[in-house]
Amino acid sequence: MRVWKRLCCVSLAGVGLSLASCSSTGFAGSIYMSPDQTGNRTQTVFYEDSAETPAIYAIIPIVSGKSDESLVVTLKVKDVFGHPVSSVYKPFLIAQIAPGLASKPTNIGVPFPDPPPILTPNPADPTSPISQPQLRAVGDYQIIATLNGDTQTVNFKIIPASPAFQQEFDPNAGTPNAAPIPGACTAQTIANCPVPTQDQVDNASADICCTSDGNCGIGIVGTGLCAQHPFNN
């Protein structure tokens, strides 16, 4: 029956009918990766950090004439940090969706399973811990989507953060180092600069800031001046 439906699509293509016209449920196009849930942009390379790549989605175009059909999406890890792992880690389920009735082509956006954030104590408010996003694992991945007996795949990469967004991690503590690496202090990372004690500054109006060369520093509030301080070396 499936072969006959495919032959039907081929034979009717000349009179302007699409695949959706020949099958009540199935893929309405090739699946692809995007940083948008709506699939407005197509990408195959994403950054490990959430500052540069806030989210990663697999976009799956479908049509569905059945209310009880299931779209099954799995993730295959092909290699991590240059080490092949596909023989060790089998594809694992990330979504099982009942798309319902969709007579017109519809995009289903399935998010990449980002690692959960790390919660660290907040000295200013012990009841509200600070949420620190973790980096995604750098490597090569594959999305596998199955619908109504058909399967499609798409490959994509996660690459290291660009220098301006890189953060150091302490392998012993297992939590992010508070300070941005030298040259990486920006408006996005300044919150991670170390906070000096009053003994380390000689002005009560001192404020954390980024120096012109991208290092954590100390400046006087309201002046716009910022100088690298010894405690940040």
Image: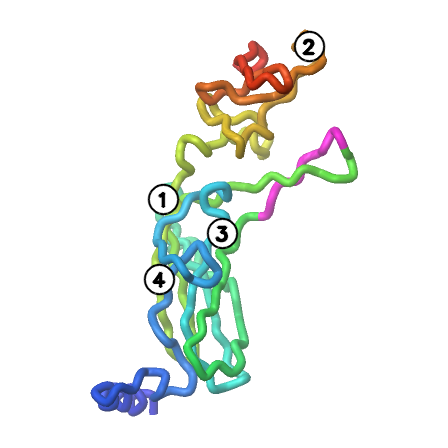
SS category of the residue bearing label 4: strand
Q: Earlier in the sequence, mark 1 or mark 4?
A: 1
Other residues around mark 2 within 10 Å, as few (<14) / some (14–19) / many (≥20):
few
Mark 4 highlights which residue? 154
Mark 1 highlights which residue? 83
- Amino acid found under the numbered disc labelled 2: Asn
Viewed as shown, does residue 76 lie left or right of 51? left
Q: Which of marks 2 and 3 is nearer the N terminus?
A: 3
Residue 203 is labelled as 2
Mark 3 highlights which residue? 55
- Amino acid found under the numbered disc labelled 1: His
Q: Which of marks 1 and 3 is nearer the N terminus?
A: 3
Of the residues tagged 1 and 3, which is closer to the observer?
Answer: 3
Other residues around mark 4 within 10 Å, as few (<14) / some (14–19) / many (≥20):
some
Of the residues tagged 2 and 4, which is closer to the observer?
Answer: 2
- Amino acid found under the numbered disc labelled 3: Ala
Residues under numbered marks 1 and 3 in contact, where contact means CB atoms less than 8 Å apart: no
Q: How far apart are the two marked residues, 4 and 3, measured between alpha carbons?
A: 17 Å
Q: How far apart are the two marked residues, 2 and 3, measured between alpha carbons?
A: 41 Å
Of the residues tagged 4 and 3, which is closer to the observer?
Answer: 3
- Which quadrant is the N terminus positioned in? bottom left
Q: How far apart are the two marked residues, 1 and 4, measured between alpha carbons?
A: 20 Å
Of the residues tagged 2 and 3, which is closer to the observer?
Answer: 2
Residues under numbered marks 2 and 4 in contact, where contact means CB atoms less than 8 Å apart: no
Where residue 145 sits: x, y (%)?
42, 69
Q: Which of marks 4 and 3 is nearer the N terminus?
A: 3
